[in-house]
Image (cartoon, coloured by chain):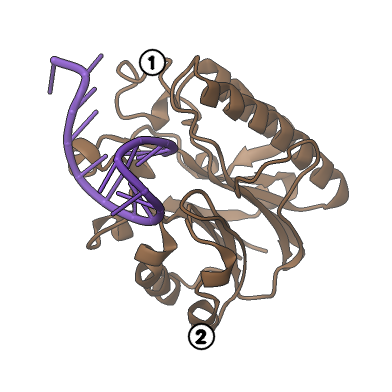
DNA sequence: ATGGTGGGAACCCCA
């Protein structure tokens, strides 16, 4: 089973990239973030024509998540307890008996801001939801744009980013609370080195200069973590014309 | 030196 995540930064602009990547990579599951479109205009037919099923939760202009899968996603959840929120950032569904939880984590702007507090509160509620899902499902994958670099190996210049947004101790502690529920960062099961990134700022020629962070993660529960056979970041789509600022991350399971 | 680029909307917000 091959599971992937990609923040596409507008599915309207990136649809051809997604279709091209599905065609070549043939994932069983591709979780999208930042589709930035309402459900009534979602390109369902184009994705189905590529041989996939898809479920989605979108809104106008901002956010938006989708799960594309070879088998039909079941038992879809778009809203969680204690978080009444018009922002479409959460999508859970079951595919091949694996519970997939697709997250577009709040960016948070900067430490000390209202958005930062909202991010931490959002993560707290989502952590409670994941804990509930863990009690209901045996095999769980939580993936998406976490907007948190797990540790300094995931940051091109840790000194420059010290306690900056995406790298603060508070955000990392919040991520660790999810991991403590019984998850592994699948990429780190197979790669210990620094310098692997999934997002590069459009500004200042970030991709060419290697100014990246690894903030797109695929977390898997215990039994699945023992079945990981490969985990990698596919930087090719970041080199395509008019790319997303994120590139797909992939984990393969003997499942 | 506190910038810049990109997406979407609508002359500004968000990342």
Mark 1, other Cα within 10 Å: few <14 / some 14–19 / many ≥20: some
**SS for callout 1:** loop
Residue designated by label 1: A162
**Label 2 marks which chain's residue?**
A
Up-down relation of residue B10 to residue A164 (above or below): below
Looking at the rendered image, the disc whose residue lies closer to the viewer, 2 or 1, is 2
Q: Is residue A146 left or right of residue A237?
A: right
Q: Is residue A17 left or right of residue A204?
A: right
Q: Does residue A62 appear anywhere in the picture?
A: yes
Identify the image quadrant of the N terminus of chain A.
bottom right
Q: Name the one closer to the observer, A114 or A9.
A: A114
Say the numbered circle drawn on residue A74: none
Residue drawn where x is 46% and y is 31% of the image: A149
Q: Name the one closer to the observer, B12 or A75.
A: B12
Q: Does residue A250 appear anywhere in the picture?
A: no
Residue drawn where x is 67% and y is 75% of the image: A71
Q: Quadrant of residue A132?
A: top right
Note the chain letter of the purple one.
B
Q: Is residue A205 left or right of residue A243?
A: left
Q: CA distance from mark 2 to mark 1?
A: 45 Å
**Label 1 marks which chain's residue?**
A
Say the numbered circle drawn on residue A49: 2
Q: Earlier along the polypeptide chain: callout 2 or callout 1?
A: 2
Residue A105 position within the rendered picture, expressed as x and y whole percent measured from the top left = 56, 39
Up-down relation of residue A185 to residue A160 (above or below): below
Residue A66 position within the rendered picture, expressed as x and y whole percent measured from the top left = 58, 61
Up-down relation of residue A37 to residue A90 (above or below): below
Note the chain letter of the brown one.
A
Identify the image quadrant of the C terminus of chain A.
bottom right
């Amino acid at each position: 089973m091959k599971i992937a995540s990609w923040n596409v930064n507008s599915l309207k602009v990136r649809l051809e990239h997604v279709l091209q990547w599905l065609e070549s990579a043939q994932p069983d599951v591709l979780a999208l973030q930042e589709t930035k479109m309402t459900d009534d205009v979602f390109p369902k037919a184009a994705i189905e024509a590529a041989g996939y099923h898809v479920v989605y939760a979108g809104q106008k202009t901002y956010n938006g998540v989708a799960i594309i899968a070879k088998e039909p996603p079941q038992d879809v959840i778009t809203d969680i307890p204690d978080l009444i929120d018009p922002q479409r950032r959460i999508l859970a569904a079951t595919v091949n008996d694996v519970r997939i939880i697709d997250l577009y984590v709040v960016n948070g702007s900067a430490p000390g801001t209202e958005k930062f507090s909202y991010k931490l509160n959002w993560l707290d509620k989502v952590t409670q939801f994941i804990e509930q899902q863990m009690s209901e499902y045996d095999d769980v994958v939580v993936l998406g744009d976490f907007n948190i670099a797990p540790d300094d190996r995931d940051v091109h210049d840790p000194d420059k980013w010290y306690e900056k947004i995406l790298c603060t101790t508070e955000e990392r502690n919040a991520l660790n609370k999810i991991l403590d529920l019984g998850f592994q960062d699948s990429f780190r099961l197979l790669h210990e080195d620094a310098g692997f990134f999934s997002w590069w700022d459009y500004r200042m020629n970030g991709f060419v200069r290697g100014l990246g962070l690894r903030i797109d993660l695929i977390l898997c529960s215990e039994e699945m973590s023992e079945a990981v056979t490969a985990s990698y970041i596919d930087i090719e789509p970041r080199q395509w014309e008019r790319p997303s600022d994120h590139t797909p991350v992939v984990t393969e399971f003997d499942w």
